[in-house]
Image (tube, coloured by chain):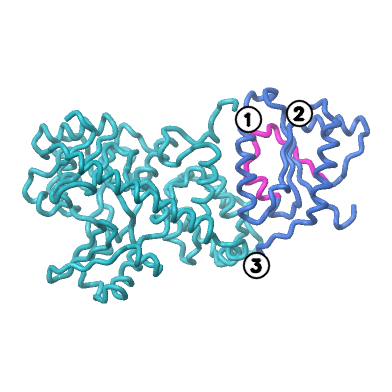
Amino acid sequence: MDSNYLLARAKDKDLLEKGECGGAVSSIFQYLLDCNLVEGVLNLSHGEDIYDGIPTLIEDSNDLIETCGSLHCAPTMFGELISKYLQDIRLAVAVKPCDAMAIKELENRHQIDSDKIYKVGLNCGGTVLPITARKMIELFYEIDPADVVKEEIDKGKFIIELTDGSHKDLKIDDLEDEGYGRRVNCQRCEQMVPRNADIACGNWGTEPGWTFIEIITPKGKELVEGARQNGYIEVKAPSEKAVAIREKVESVMIKMARKFQDKYLEENYPSLEEWDEYWNRCIKCYACRDACPLCYCRECELEKEFYQDSENTPPDPLTFQGVRLSHVCYSCINCGQCEDVCPMEIPVARIFHRMQKKYRDQTGYIAGMDEELPPLYSPEKE
Amino acid sequence: MSENEPKIIGFCCNWCCYGGADTAGTARMQYPPNVRIVRVMCSGRINPSMVLKAFKEGADGVFVGGCHMGDCHYDAGNYKWRRRAKFVEDLLPEFGIDKERFRFEWISASEGEKFQKTMEEFRNSLKKHGSLQRSFSK
């Protein structure tokens, strides 16, 4: 096992069958729990339907089977859950790139202990809002959303499986042209492979029934090696072609993301008048702040007396989002949670992502990827 | 002061710029009375949110003065402020405030003349821009 690339699949029959791409990820979790390397595994389990995912802490490896399978229509965020509620246990967590970025930023801020956590990364081409998913399945697939039993995103297509076992797929590009498809922040995201986790797992370039794993950290190497030696996964080397395909998929997706960044953050970026209209909708519910994985202060400056307006709503954007931007936008990981939770549909993530990009261009700091805090906090004389 | 004179909030560090303003005063150098000085212990103490709050409350321009690089009374406060100041310059246009309305400068306690000159320049440039018309209105 010299190379950092390998293909893996579960040895356990149930996981092999029920897990996505051979169930390698679930098997690695099984190994971690069985060998007591962690006390719990944080993962998503299925809710009522495919549009519902529930963050679940699994403490018994027999329960892992509930967390098998993909849930693209249930965008969640694990960073904050860990820093708020799971700080004190040894944990393994399945992370999308944005989860991994949030965790990295929180580690830099001493809110998560990196020694206590295994980050098993999952490649991610984007997620879909549950409401959008339901609407587009009804409109474009002409199917009752309740009849869908499984969904998958592969080769640029959003694929659904019905109760009778039949499949239907449509190109995501076409759906996005119509204003559906992936969340807009996901469209802008250029981090498909979580290179800030310990390992990155996915289906790009792999053969059916196998997971492609890229080993990133020494801890990740130890983890995969341990799972193999203890008989939880079997591994083989990927063909050169497989590695090439995977690289190609990634580079194409990054190019697309850059295009979307230009589209949403430059060309179609809201004008000041449009922003005014957005800010006027604000009902000051603080949901954006509460959902932000990076906002961890126990006492928030926004609630200080000196920022209160005489009339309560809408708050002056300068001393509401402006103050939030000045606190966290350097580290904005573009997870889109603020935008998702906004009851007034203000595209908050756009201004944050735009400011992060400006900051990145000036300082080279990439949120969620660097091992250190943004240079703003540096004690250096420069 | 007439109605159409720009209002300037000036945050000055105790050890250098505030001293510079003092020097200008004791030497009876004339500088525009538009600036309302707020003394802070160090330019490194200034947050972007203080600048934002000043604009929100109706300032037409915000000035920040600190020690020259290498002269910070607390070693590196002005380096920290400089990094923050660059960010403020990027942030203000997002809310429709021209970054010309925000200015920062390094002025030592002996540079009364530089303080005088900076204030005159800043006032004149703000006068040209006119009073701040915030596009946000409830």
Q: Which residue is mark 1?
A: B79
Display colour for chain B: blue
Residue A313 can be seen in this image = no
The span picked out in magenta is B35-54
In percent of width and height, residue A254 lies at: 38, 48
Q: Position of residue A172 (x, y in %)?
A: 32, 63
Badge 3 local density, few (<14 within 10 Å), some, or many (20+)?
Answer: few
Q: Nearer the viewer, mark 1 or mark 2?
A: 1
The N terminus of chain A - image quarter: top left
Between the C-alphas of marks 1 and 2, the distance is 14 Å
Q: Secondary structure at mark 3?
A: loop
- How many marks are shown on the rendered structure? 3
Q: Which residue is mark 3?
A: B138
Q: Position of residue A191 (x, y in %)?
A: 37, 46
Q: Quadrant of residue B72?
A: top right
Near-viewer residue (A98 or B55) = A98
Does residue B112 sit above or below B9 in this rendering? above
Per the model, the C-alpha gap separating discs 3 and 1 is: 38 Å
Chain A: give its colour: cyan
Q: Is residue B42 magenta?
A: yes
Q: CA distance from mark 2 to mark 3?
A: 40 Å
Location of residue A317 with respect to B27 vertically, above or below: below
The residue wearing badge 2 is B16
Q: Nearer the viewer, residue B93 or A237?
A: A237
